Amino acid sequence: MSKGTIKKVAGPLVVAEGMRDANMFDVVRVSDQRLIGEIIEIHGDQASIQVYEETSGLGPGEPVESTGTPLSVELGPGLIGSIFDGIQRPLVDIMEATGTNLKRGVEIPSLKRDKKWHFIPTVKVGDVVEAGDIIGTVEETDIVTQKIMIPYQINGIIKSINEGDFTVLDTVAVLEKGDGTTVNITLMQKWPVRIGRPYKQKLSPDKPLVTGQRVVDTLFPIAKGGVAAVPGPFGSGKTVVQHQLAKWAEADIIVYIGCGERGNEMTDVLNEFPELKDPKTGKSLMERTVLIANTSDMPVAAREASIYVGITIAEYFRDMGYSVALMADSTSRWAEALREMSGRLEEMPGEEGYPAYLGSRLAQFYERAGRVISLGKEGREGTLSAIGAVSPPGGDISEPVSQATLRIVKVFWSLDANLAYRRHFPAINWLTSYSLYNLGNWFNANVNDKWMELRQRIMHLLNDEAELDEIVKLVGMDALSAPDRLKLEAARSIREDFLHQDAFHEVDTYTDLDKQFMMMELVLQYYDVSLGALSKGVSIDSLVKLAVRENIGRFKYVSTDKTAAEFDDILQKLQVEVDNLVNKEEA
């Protein structure tokens, strides 16, 4: 254990001398207040430490003590439903101990040491186990069963294992290794946050993460184990998009990182999530959620660590075989924390003052997502999908964080301020967004074999609308031919009746894939039937004013159990109304 003294204090950066025996990324305790920090640079016997707490009042000569271990998270029962800060300190426990104002230097363990959990073994004495094998389960909430795994690089024979109520530090099993030594297995294990948890094999992501958000699932789907970025200016709905994904995405566990966002936004999350009903189980959404809160008024350095803490917790649940979705809101604030620390270290700045290693750090974070086969004999399949919000200043995505993110992620949901001002939500711009995951075969096989065909037609109509809009702006609507005017009407129907989705409507907030397909078919059927009627001399004005269009527009509010009947009724009504117009024209 290395001990030194403070030489210099510059905001969250503390330089200590006499630290020759310390290692990079060791956690240290700074001053008599025992503030927590991490070594990020070493020159000779001088160590630069980023301190995760307020450093005002510190001065040269105060003691610094290295713990000899890297910044690690505690993984075990008690994670689900918890609210942690950026370095996994339990905020509720700290509040109970110190009151509503957080005090510096508080040392409270991340997982409760006195709470007992009921452990049920799934292996018996004499069984041979290896790293990653599940030896028992703990019912953490009504929704989540935590699987207790053998820690990394440990294997041997189970010498003893007991069912019963244990704290996270109690020994639940004893393992005898090949050399005759024994290892005590507890419910909790630790893992350094900056190192990804190992796995056997990474698989290609080929199944979609169904979100129930039509513009996402139909036009720009993300794969389970995929990575996505949601950039957008202030007020374009990034946070609501993240909330919707947290509520409705087809994931067993949600890890939500509030990284550097405004405190009142995070307060909304903390107040809202416990009250929200999980649509799959009817229980509170918090029963499958881990929240990490490190808002803009909390220490900058901890913002940088919060991303790694969150993804390590997510990897732990992925290793159990769960599908995990991680929301990071927002990676721009994380990058700003990197920039501030880099400036204080006097490193050579890159573009816009960000450090030259910004791109590689972002890549290291996003690369930890994926669909993997976990360690252990049975080799469970788990997925970790990462969705990062990006908050470019002024909505300008040419800035370094957005550009570095775009080089890494395969899904780009571009939020548009103009759409938001027109009250079109989610404000994902269909002309500038994209998804590079090849999931068409899955949709064709599992929903309908015409899925991709209809999706392509919808994208063509939306692109044609953008081109026709330019002509209308120049010479007016009257200059367009009847088929082109019909195209504009069909595209308007796609925008207003299909892509526009109300996050706060009890039915419209989530749309299953079968209903999404029916909605696409209704809009395109209207376009096809009307095109046929135009060729028979029916006027475009009559087709625009069809009464059935109101039914097509209201279809998204029809509850799931009535969609099939309503779908058939609308198609029948459409055909009858158009036939009447054709007959009238022929007469």
Image: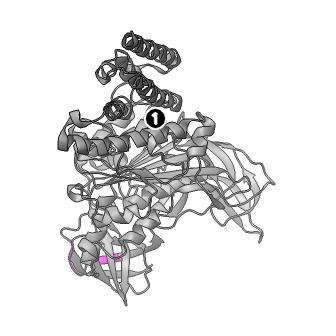
The one nearer the camera, 438 or 87, is 438
Disc 1 packing (10 Å; few <14; some 14–19; many ≥20): many
* Mark 1, secondary structure of its residue: loop
428 left or right, relative to 120: left
Q: Which amino acid does label 1 sit on?
A: Gly
Q: Is 554 situated above or below 383?
A: above
Q: Is residue 45 above or below residue 120?
A: below
- Residue 337 or residue 436, whichever sits in front: 436
* Residue situated furthest right in the rendering: 126
The residue positioned 46% from the left and 61% from the top of the image is: 366
Above or below, 250 against 173 in this view is: above
Left or right: where 472 falls relative to 435: left
Estimate the x, y position of residue 102 in percent, counting from the top left.
26, 53
What quarter of the picture does the N terminus occupy?
bottom left
- Image location of residue 76, percent across then percent down: 54, 51
Q: Which residue is drawn at 62% across and 48% down?
A: 321
Q: Is the magenta stretch mostly helix, strand or loop?
A: loop
Which segment did they paint magenta? 58-64
